[in-house]
Amino acid sequence: MNEKFAELGSPRRIWVIAAIHGDVGRLASLHDHVASRFAVRDRLVYMGNYLGVDSPDNAAVMDEILAFRGALLCKTGVEPSDIVFLRGPAEEAWQRLLRLQFAPLPHQALERLLASGVEAYLRLYGVSVNDTRSIARVGSLALTRWTNQLRGLQRGAPGHERLMCVMRRAGFTAPGADGKKLLLVPANFDPTRSLDDQGESLWWAASAFRLTGRATTLYNRVVRGFDSVNGGADLDDAAVTLDAGCGRGGPLLCGCFTPSGKLVELVVTGGRGAIETMPYEREAANDFHSDLVPQDSVVQQRTPVVLADSRGLYTGACA
């Protein structure tokens, strides 16, 4: 098994869920919809940033994700490798926090991690941010004991440590007839580097998100699940952003892609768990984009194809 990247092969469809940021209501509604559509040879990819700093119940988000994974695996023909979790900036920050004693200047490193959303994981395990800042200024021995305590808290929550262990940096499909792949990344991509050499570019980068240069000969499309500047969804270009501001006032997006990178369906979960799903038509994309800007915080409801709420319909997946 590839320890860094998820190799998606040549599936029938790939359901890609954007950054959730602790919005368990929208996530549960989306799960209900995906459960009714997910079939053998499909893949489901979560793009990271699962928890939210301002979320009232991050534990419920983790429980929802773990329960839905278990429900899908009860379906005949669904394999564990069909469900993929990427490590977003917040999850990468959490992993680095667990190794904070090795940072040259732990207190400065901590501030960078807090800016990336690691506070959501501290809150998940009941750890004070102020106490964390104090600990970051003590000696390495005391800091090591503290990070071991954090690991213990994660280990004590059923399923959490295992989930972290299976998270990957990025995912990609097998090459198509044109020799190109669909690439899925958590937050960014540097087209001047190979995938193996991306380093921190997958989570933190100052450059614009785009697919150019030599990368266009390798990938037909690159999709990310989180935009750090909260600029809204961008569905038209070779570089696709699915982040519509979920957990920050906007809806939760899920894109259904073919292995060649074609976006064939867009699922939008808005307020009160209302879902709108539609075949994606490029000509209508610009009209729809105005609904996806996070600042609007409301998805304009056209005539929906499917409406769902958060009643846990996917629990019937084992039947």
Image: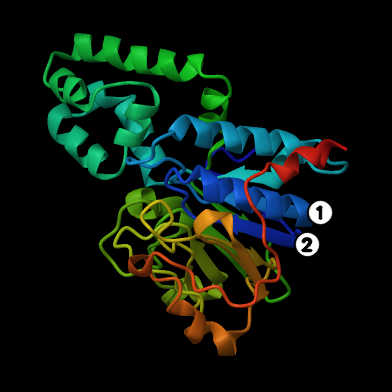
Residue 140 in the image: above or below residue 202: above
Is residue 202 something one can see in this rendering? yes
Query: On the image, numbered disc 2 is attached to which residue?
Result: 12
Give the x, y percent position of residue 256.
65, 65
Left or right for 194, reference 80: left
User: Regarding mark 1 in the picture, which secondary structure is present there?
Assistant: loop
Q: Residue furthest bottom?
A: 283
Query: On the image, numbered disc 1 is attached to which residue?
Result: 39
Q: Is residue 258 or residue 288 the one in the foreground?
A: 288
The image quarter containing residue 260 is bottom right
Amino acid type at circle 1 is Ala
Query: Pointer 1 and pointer 2: residues touching (CB < 8 Å)?
Result: yes
Give the x, y percent position of residue 64.
59, 36
Amino acid type at circle 2 is Arg
Give the x, y percent position of residue 47.
51, 51
Q: Is residue 73 or residue 247 the one in the foreground?
A: 247
At horizontal 58% and vertical 24% (from top left) the residue drawn is: 159
Q: Characterize the local packing of mark 1: few (<14), some (14-19) or many (20 or more) Cα atoms within 10 angstroms.
A: some
Left or right for 124, reference 136: right
Q: Residue furthest front?
A: 272
